[in-house]
Image: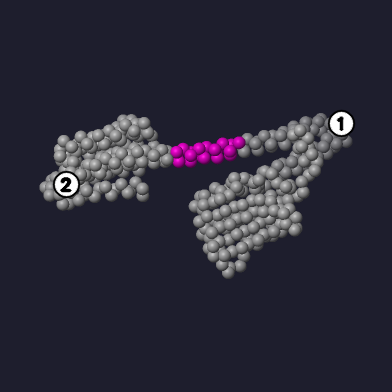
Amino acid sequence: MWIGIWLAYLAPPLGDLYGGGHGPWATALGALGLAAFVAVYLLLVFRYTSRVLGSHTLDCLLAGVLALAVCLSLTMGSPWLVLFVYVSVSAGAVLPLRQAAVAIPATVAVLLLVALPHGYDDGLTPWLITPALLGGFAMSGVRQLVRTTVELREARVTVAALAANEERLRMARDLHDLLGHSLSLITLKSELAGRMLPDHPDRAGEQVADIERVSRQALTDVREAVSGYRRLTLSGELAGACTTLAVAGVETRMPVEAPAELPGVLGTESEAALAWSLREAVTNIVRHSGAGSCEIRLAPRQTLEGLFLQLTVEDDGHGLGSAPAGNGLTGLGERLDKVGGTLDVRSSRSGVTLTMRAPLDPPDPQRGAGLTGSGA
């Protein structure tokens, strides 16, 4: 839409075509030249702003629009000088900043060379020099912004791929550490039991019992590891909420991560309850609220019932109205109640505020003393 604003400068050449008193052939050739000029201009601006082209391709396309601007201005008259503004914008759209800094003033110089010797300086030229300069350099800034955005998206994809690969490597290391020793021990004991079985069946039975014990312990370790991978964390859900709301077009104000310093200990079950609550709240905002902005706050709170970590999610949507609470909010309240937390829902025409609290365990004195001692 921003680039489309520049198409308003086509009014003088279009007006000249329909009311300039040119002959049929001149009008037809002028219209054809103008269509070719606009086609190449749009090709450059819309398709190649964010791409790197070979110098030969750029030279040909820019030389083409410049040649058309010169030819049409010399043959059709002063209203067609406006095409040099498009040449300047095209140079700013596709050329690197250093080259554009030379090409844009050069385009303005060609504009003056075409206008002044042929008596086209009737007050129109001064009004074109400034748009040509400002439009070209403004387009250079837009090009840098587009290229930076593309590089940022590519960097995000790369970071996501690296994070996934690192997670796979971590899982592989953990499984190797968990199962490598156990499986090796099971293999050795199986071979030993096989050799003892003909002559010493009682000792072979002992080895089989050890194999059963080791295998059960390995199974327990694997289950604990898998449950650890599946456990939701508050920091992870905060990052996921930021991404989800941004994709949905909801402006978000929120902490970057969970607070590191707390006046108590956030237990595993309490953290999981808050993480699930945050996920449910964000899902409701995206699907049902129609909100344009959202604020997420996370802070410890001291109440009469004890010390809590409070998570507040506030949006500016249309509220819950008179409809009863859905299964999501009901399940959210039950999950918090299970860990000793609370849920407070406030709804109005200006939005919904969810206040979720999960208890903080008292700090461990021994742990604090150990940290103090190590710090000293």
Which of the two labelled residues, at mark 1 and mark 2, occupies the earlier sequence position? 2
Quadrant showing the C terminus = top right
Residue at image location 25% in from the left, 48% down from the top: 10
Instruction: Choose top left, top right, bottom left or bottom right for residue 364.
Output: top right
Q: Is residue 183 left or right of residue 102?
A: right
Q: Which residue is mark 1?
A: 199
Q: Which residue is mark 2?
A: 28
Residue 310 point in image, percent of width and height: 67, 54
Residue at image location 14% in from the left, 45% down from the top: 26
What secondary structure is marked by label 1?
loop
Q: Which residues are magenta?
A: 148-166
Binning the other alpha carbons within 10 Å of mark 1 as few (below 14), some (14 to 19) or many (20 upward) gives few
Q: Is residue 150 magenta?
A: yes
**What secondary structure characterizes most of the magenta part?**
helix
**Vertical relation: 54 (above or below) 134:** above
Residue situated in front as seen by the camera: 313 or 246: 313
